[in-house]
Image (cartoon, rainbow, N blue to C red):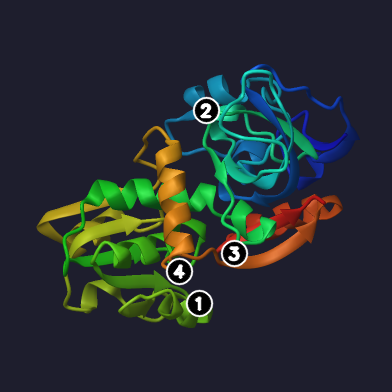
């Protein structure tokens, strides 16, 4: 099978398409024929080894020291189950699924992947294409974890900073679902997008001073980790909750993915796709995402 491999950290050009051995599922695994994956900011950080300050040692332990420990990137995927292990009970051949690979050693950048039936994997919503479904687990699960952590009460004022990115677009929709009065912060070209996702108010950070709006918020979620803390604290009520995407963590659960699936089926959540690239254009996809201006998600079509 074909897979996109990187054997050293660096620029997008370290990514290469190579032939590797097709995996075989173990007893409790399924073999997924991958139709689509994505390029996320996480893929960019792992490939280039650009990590938040103070996390160098931890990152090396996870990613590798002299070379990548996990040579196939790809943090989310959608595809079809081609084979099942002898003791699999939750899925069958032919099931269309979507999944987060974070606890499965990545591997979305390949034609096939073996996946634990007990992993973060669920049946794909029928109304989504493979490309759309692949864009749900990463940003969707991250947004859900943070928005749930905030315990939003109906009518509370919620600020989503970086509202047009992958996590931000889901965060806007989820904050609205949980009853928040949502203000989304993004650049000029993305104002209409954030409005269509349900934001009650949008602020163009390139033209407006957040501290001059005369508002304070019950919840602030910095979905890109770029809001200066001093500004964030000025905008937060004394009893408010402040969340930074790079400073919150939690174990992913399949229940969370199924929750997102249910919202999608109910028409209350949708993925935003910026661009779709063919498998062989993975370097161009990484270059685009690395610029830091994508809206929603960038998808890679595998087959």
* C-alpha separation, residue under disc 3 versus residue under disc 1: 25 Å
Mark 4 lies on residue: 267
Mark 2 lies on residue: 118
Q: Can the viewer see residue 120 in this picture?
A: yes
Q: Secondary structure at mark 1?
A: helix
Q: Residue at x 26, y 46 (%)?
A: 149
Q: Is residue 280 left or right of residue 216?
A: right
Q: Secondary structure at mark 4?
A: loop
Q: Earlier in the sequence, mark 2 or mark 4?
A: 2
Q: Earlier in the sequence, mark 3 or mark 1?
A: 3
Task: Kindly indicate whether the residue at mark 3 contacts the one at mark 4 (C-beta within 8 angstroms).
Answer: no
User: Callout 1: 10 Å neighbours few (<14), some, many (20+)?
Assistant: some
Q: Secondary structure at mark 2?
A: loop
* C-alpha separation, residue under disc 2 versus residue under disc 3: 24 Å
- In the rendered structure, find residue 127 and report the number of the disc placed on it: 3
For residue 83, above or below residue 155? above
Residue 90 percent across, percent down from the top left: 56, 32
Task: Kindly indicate whether the residue at mark 1 contacts the one at mark 3 (C-beta within 8 angstroms).
Answer: no
Q: Is residue 100 left or right of residue 67?
A: left
* C-alpha separation, residue under disc 2 versus residue under disc 4: 27 Å
User: Callout 3: 10 Å neighbours few (<14), some, many (20+)?
Assistant: few
User: Callout 4: 10 Å neighbours few (<14), some, many (20+)?
Assistant: few
> Residue 235 or 104: which is nearer the viewer?
104
Quarter of the picture containing the N terminus is top right
User: Callout 2: 10 Å neighbours few (<14), some, many (20+)?
Assistant: some
- In the rendered structure, find residue 190 and report the number of the disc placed on it: 1
Discs 1/2, front = 2
* Circle count: 4
* C-alpha separation, residue under disc 4 versus residue under disc 3: 10 Å
Q: Residue at x 43, y 36 (%)?
A: 252
Residue 279 percent across, percent down from the top left: 82, 51
Q: Is residue 278 left or right of residue 148?
A: right
């Amino acid at each position: 099978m074909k897979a996109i491999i990187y054997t050293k950290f660096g620029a997008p050009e370290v990514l290469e398409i190579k032939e590797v051995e097709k995996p075989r599922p173990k007893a409790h695994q399924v073999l997924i024929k991958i139709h689509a994956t994505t390029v996320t900011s996480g893929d960019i950080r792992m490939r280039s080894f650009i990590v938040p300050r103070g996390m160098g040692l931890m990152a090396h332990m996870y990613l590798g020291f002299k070379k990548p420990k996990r040579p196939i990137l790809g943090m989310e995927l959608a595809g079809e189950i081609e084979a099942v292990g002898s003791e699999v009970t939750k899925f069958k051949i032919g099931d269309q699924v979507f999944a987060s690979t974070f606890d499965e050693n990545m591997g979305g950048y390949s034609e096939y992947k073996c996946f634990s039936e007990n992993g973060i994997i669920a049946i794909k919503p029928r109304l989504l294409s493979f490309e759309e479904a692949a864009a749900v687990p990463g940003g969707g699960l991250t947004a859900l974890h943070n928005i749930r952590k905030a315990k939003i009460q109906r009518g509370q004022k919620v600020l989503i900073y970086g509202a047009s990115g992958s996590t931000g677009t889901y965060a806007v929709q989820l904050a609205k679902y949980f009853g928040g009065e949502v203000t989304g912060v993004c650049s000029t070209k993305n104002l209409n997008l954030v409005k269509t996702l349900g934001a009650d108010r949008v602020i163009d950070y390139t033209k407006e001073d957040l501290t001059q709006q005369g508002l304070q918020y019950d919840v602030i979620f910095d979905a890109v980790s770029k809001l200066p803390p001093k500004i964030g604290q000025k905008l937060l009520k004394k009893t408010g909750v402040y969340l930074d995407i790079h400073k919150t963590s939690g174990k992913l659960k399949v229940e969370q993915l199924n929750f997102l699936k249910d919202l999608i089926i109910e028409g209350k959540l949708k993925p935003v796709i910026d661009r779709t690239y063919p498998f062989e254009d993975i370097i161009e996809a990484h270059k685009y995402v690395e610029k830091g201006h994508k809206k929603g998600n960038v998808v890679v079509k595998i087959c």
